[in-house]
Image (cartoon, rainbow, N blue to C red):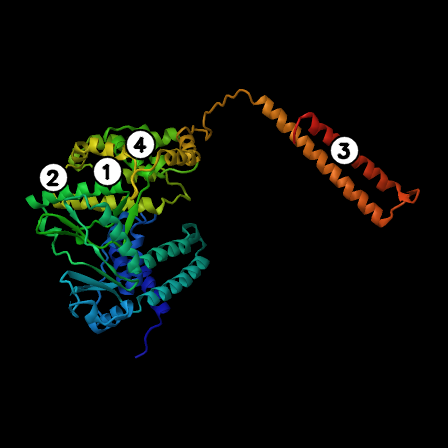
Amino acid sequence: MLRTPRSIEIILAFGGFALAWLRHRPQELPQRFKQTIERLGTTFIKLAQGLSLRMDLLPKAYRDALAELQSRVAPFPGAEAIVAIETAFGAPLDQLFARFDTQPLAAASVAQIHRAEMPDGRAVIVKVRRPGIVRQVGRDLRLLRRIVRGATWLLPGLRRQRPLALIDELGKQLFGELDLRHEAQNVRRLAAALRQQGGLHVPAVIDPLVTADVMVQEFAPGRPVSERFGTPAGEELAVSLLDAYLHQLFVVGAFHADPHPGNLFARDDGRLCLHDFGLVGSLDTLSRQALGRMLEAVIYRDAEAALASAIELGFVAGAFDRRALQRGIDTILAELQGQPLAEWSLAETLWRIAQLGAGEHFRIPRHLLVLLRALFLLESTLRALDPRFDLVGELMKRREVLQTALAAPVAGPAGPRPAGQLALRSVRDLPRLLSHWLQQAQADDGRPPIAIHHRGLERLESRLERVGNRMVLALLALGLYVGGAVLMLHSAGPWLYGVPIAAVVAFVAAAGLSLKLIAAVFRSEGL
């Protein structure tokens, strides 16, 4: 049986959606789009999951539909997994594990998971990347680029959305998720940072059993948190989940960016267990502090402080009307005041504030999109666990702890940073801090109202002027010397005692300028 070429398959799939767009009601289209993506397989499912982050490009109904995408694929044979494991680690399977289940525990489009036991008796899972997936993704991305390039030629209006740049961005993200070493690094980073969180467990990576194709990780049994929704145990898990994310966001600066119920398990000891670390977000120190001030400004309806924090976070860029943005933020915050505190959505509020600063060519930075998506998922999961969960009230209870954490200097593996290095870092940060201050001081006409006063610069200006004059004299003298030499070589007349007169004049003028320059240097007592 002849198989349809992949490029034709992609064109027919999206062509079918275009026809559906003409025939169906608008509310049905997001699910039709999701079904189209599912039929195209792994590459497009993972690209669409990444695209669901782009809240600045897609309507909410489409984002919600794409976020539901699951990679429902049949497992590949256990024999192929064994070959991949032995190739990755360069040793027979029976030397690596005391027991290995050839029947996978779970299978997805990128990898599947097998249970195993280490020679020392530890229970582990072995995550094996699907054979040929990297080659398949690369081929699909090349085809997609060609199709999109042709579409932009036929429909020039598409170029404003920069679709090729978007494909490259999503493709880079996808290749990062395909490399299991990247996921292992994320696990190590968060496991070390969250070790102090008593209510949270991160299954450890078993080093050195990690390659791009295979990752061995501690087996952490548990039950899906969905079984605890709306129960007393769910209320306890909601508090643990909030504490875990406050610690990640405001203390660690790295966070598990996909906290939907499918990645959260409840252990028998009452702790939460996090799974799937393919997507991890990060916030630098200043962003963490700005986020903390933003949340406080929202809670206390401080539009001016919220705008300052939005600028520092990067939600607002370029020239803007400060008063108009502040009025817009105040309107958003005023709408919250009429709602019960337990119904406030801080994630939705931050997103609405971010949209106020969106211009025609504005794109919210990817790390902020990852943050916003994680906050939306976190709120949704918290309220599924405890429908009466009062997010604002819980944050208020932890206000002093958060302020202490944000004010504390960040300590690395070698301990706190020495004071001299902190001072040097402050000096390096001055240009960026000045930029933030200028943005916050920006007036309606785009010019910050700044008056600069100085004393004692007149002498410096005079010295700079003299230095400039001397440089001009030196360049003139050099030019005359070169010109005189050229005239001598070409024997250009008229002549005086066998020497070209023009060359003599050039040398005399150059010598005069040189003497004047030397005299000026001696008068200033130094070069």
Where's the N terminus, which quadrant?
bottom left
Q: CA distance from mark 4 to mark 3?
A: 63 Å
Badge 2 is on which residue? Answer: 388
Name the amino acid type tagged 1. Answer: Leu
- Verify CB contact (< 8 Å) between mark 3 and mark 1: no
Question: SS class of the residue under badge 4?
Answer: helix
- Label 2, residues with CA under 10 Å away: few <14, some 14-19, many ≥20: few
Q: Residue furthest right?
A: 497
Question: SS class of the residue under badge 1?
Answer: helix
- Label 4, residues with CA under 10 Å away: few <14, some 14-19, many ≥20: many
**Reading the chain from its start, which is encountered first: label 3 or label 2?**
2
Badge 3 is on which residue? Answer: 513
- Label 1, residues with CA under 10 Å away: few <14, some 14-19, many ≥20: many
Left/right of residue 339 with respect to residue 373 in the rendered view = left
- Which quarter of the picture shows residue 414? top left
**Reading the chain from its start, which is encountered first: label 4 or label 1?**
4
Q: CA distance from mark 4 to mark 1?
A: 12 Å
Badge 4 is on which residue? Answer: 306
Q: CA distance from mark 1 to mark 2?
A: 16 Å
Badge 1 is on which residue? Answer: 346
Coordinates of residue 303 in the picture (x, y in percent): 30, 29
